Amino acid sequence: MIPAKFPMSEAKQRAAQKAIDYLEDDMIVGVGTGSTVACFIDALAAWKGRIRGAVSSSEQSTAQLKSHGIDVIDLNTAGPLSLYVDGADECDPHKRLIKGGGGALTREKIIAQASQRFVCIIDPAKQVPLLGNFPLPIEVIPMARSLVARAIVGTTGGQPVWREGFVTDNGNAILDVHNLRIVDPVGLERELNQIPGVVCVGLFAQRAADVVIVGGEPVKVL
Ligand code: 5RP
């Protein structure tokens, strides 16, 4: 008998639940954005009295954290964090990621950088041998959108598409770059960061994840 495909929502739930193992009493936890993180925030509610609070990467996650009565703390007040939990759109075998499908990449990258341990929670469909099938999100200053798009075509050969109608929590625009085959994620992240007008590149390669939890049957911790 062919086993039924493991439901994606269940995979996200399982990955999120496993990330609870990384919590410690009295910590301030960094919290990402997305549907997998939404499962994590729901699970975090049971820890409300044990953690000091959370640093949030988006208005969406902030609203959900507050709905559970979890204190949302400014990163400048929190200082260095011991743990950041977030999802991803793609994850390669070196735990390098594409993120930003939800548009929260800039704050996500800031919190990842501020954190000692980055635990990434994904469903199995996010695992790829090479990054780039998922369009790479790049947050740009609105007036630089066309300039950055032309520079991206010139340097990568990829096709930037403006995420029209979408404004980030920082008031900026997103370009999603299609048709990339990212063989050198660290180099590409560095190169794209040099383009004036780029706020943040959704490649998390210079600061990759430390732990990747893949929800599924069984849950895998990489
Ligand atoms: C948001 C992100 C998310 O982590 C990413 O899009 C994955 O989302 P989901 O858990 O809904 O699949 O980077 O900016």
Image: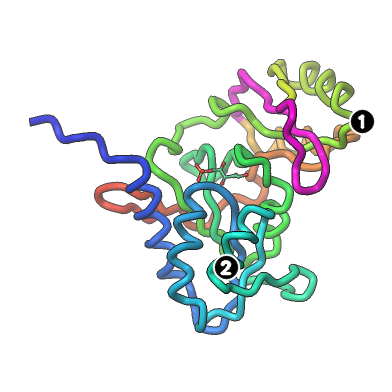
Residue 125 vs 156, above or below: the answer is below
Residue underneath mark 1 = 143
Q: In this view, does 11 lie to the left or right of 182?
A: left
Question: Residue 6 or 211: which is nearer the viewer?
Answer: 6
The three-letter code of the residue at mark 2 reads: Leu
Residue at the limit of the structure toward the left, as seen here: 1
x, y (%) of residue 56? 66, 61
Is the N terminus in the top left, top right, bottom left or bottom right quadrant? top left
The three-letter code of the residue at mark 1 reads: Met
Q: Does the magenta stretch include residue 83?
A: no
Residue underneath mark 2 = 83
Q: Which residue is drawn at 84% across and 18% down?
A: 150
x, y (%) of residue 127? 43, 38
Q: In this view, does 61 lie to the left or right of 166?
A: left
Question: Residue 51 or 109: which is nearer the viewer?
Answer: 51
Q: Which segment is the magenta one?
A: 163-183
x, y (%) of residue 37? 51, 54
Residue 25 vs 79, above or below: the answer is below
Residue 221 vs 165, above or below: the answer is below
Q: Quadrant of residue 181?
A: top right
Instruction: Check mark 1 vs ligand 1: CB closer than 8 Å? yes or no.
Output: no
Q: In this view, does 50 lie to the left or right of 151?
A: left
The mark lying in front, picked from 2 and 1, is: 1
Q: Main secondary structure of the magenta part?
A: loop
At numbered mark 1, what does the secondary structure look like: helix, strand or loop? helix
